[in-house]
Image (cartoon, rainbow, N blue to C red):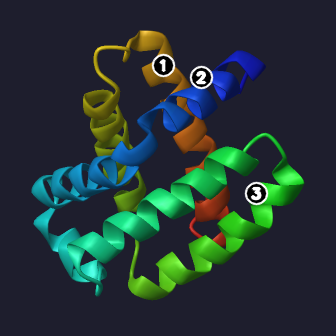
Amino acid sequence: MSPEQLDLVRTSYAALGERRTAMAADFYRRLFAADPGTEALFTAGPDVMAEMFSTELAAIVDAISSFDVVAPRLHDLAGRHAGYGVEVRHYRLVGDALVAALGAALSPAWDDELAAAWRRAYDLVAEVMMGAAGNGA
C-alpha cells in the first residue's frame, strides 16, 4: 500500500466525521442483503453494531501504517470473529459491502483512486485476519 493510498484512506475516513456510524449501518444493510445468513453471526442490535464497527474501523485506519501496532489488534479481532463463526467466504462479502458503503457515504468525492486505496487497505487487513484465524490468506 503506497503512502498516497494510506493518506487517501485516512483523510477520507476522517471526512466522514459524524456520518461514520451511518456508513457502518449502511455497511450492515449491504452485507445482510448480499448474504442474509451473515445476520446470524451478530448478536448485538444494529445501532450497537454500527457504533462498534465505526470505532474499530477508526482504530484500524489510525494504525494501518504501522504493522507493529495494527497486527496485534487484527489478530485479536480475527480470533473473536472466528469464534462468532466467520468463515473465509465472509471476508470478500465484507470487503464488497464496506467499499460500497464508503462509496455511497463519500460521494461525490468517491472515485476509482479512492476505491482502489480502500480496497487495498481492506485486503491487507483481511489477509492478516485470515492468517491469524488459521484460514490462510
Mark 1 lies on residue: 114
Which residue is at the far right? 68
Compared with residue 69, is residue 109 higher up or lower down, i.e. above or below?
A: above
Is residue 82 left or right of 129 when viewed as pictured? left
Q: Residues within 10 Å of mark 2 (few under 14, many from 20)?
A: some
Q: Residue at x 54, y 82 (%)?
A: 80
Question: Measured from the top left, where is residue 114 in percent x and y?
Answer: 48, 19
Distance from Cα at disc 3 to Cα at disc 2: 18 Å
Q: Quadrant of the N terminus?
A: top right
Q: Residues within 10 Å of mark 1 (few under 14, many from 20)?
A: many
Q: CA distance from mark 2 to mark 1?
A: 6 Å
Q: Is residue 21 above or below residue 100?
A: below
Distance of mark 3 from mark 1, alpha carbons?
Answer: 21 Å
Q: Which residue is mark 3?
A: 70
User: For the point 27% across and 51% down, which residue is it?
Assistant: 22
Residue 137 visible in rendering: no
Q: Pinpoint residue 37: horizontal percent, then vertical percent.
A: 16, 72
Give whichever of discs 2 and 1 has the lower sequence position.
2
In terms of secondary structure, where does tag 1 sit?
helix
Identify which amino acid the numbered label 2 is placed on.
Answer: Leu
Q: Earlier in the sequence, mark 3 or mark 1?
A: 3
Look at the numbered disc 2 and give the secondary structure of its residue: helix
Residue type, mark 1 in image: Leu
Sequence order check, earlier mark of 3 and 2: 2
Q: Are marks 2 and 1 in contact (CB under 8 Å)?
A: yes
Give 86 or 11, whichever is nearer the viewer.
11
Q: Which residue is pictured at 23% across the width and 70% down the height?
A: 38
Residue 8, which numbered label? 2
Q: Residue furthest front?
A: 18
Task: Please report the residue visible at 35 percent of the width from the left and 27 percent of the height from the top.
Answer: 106
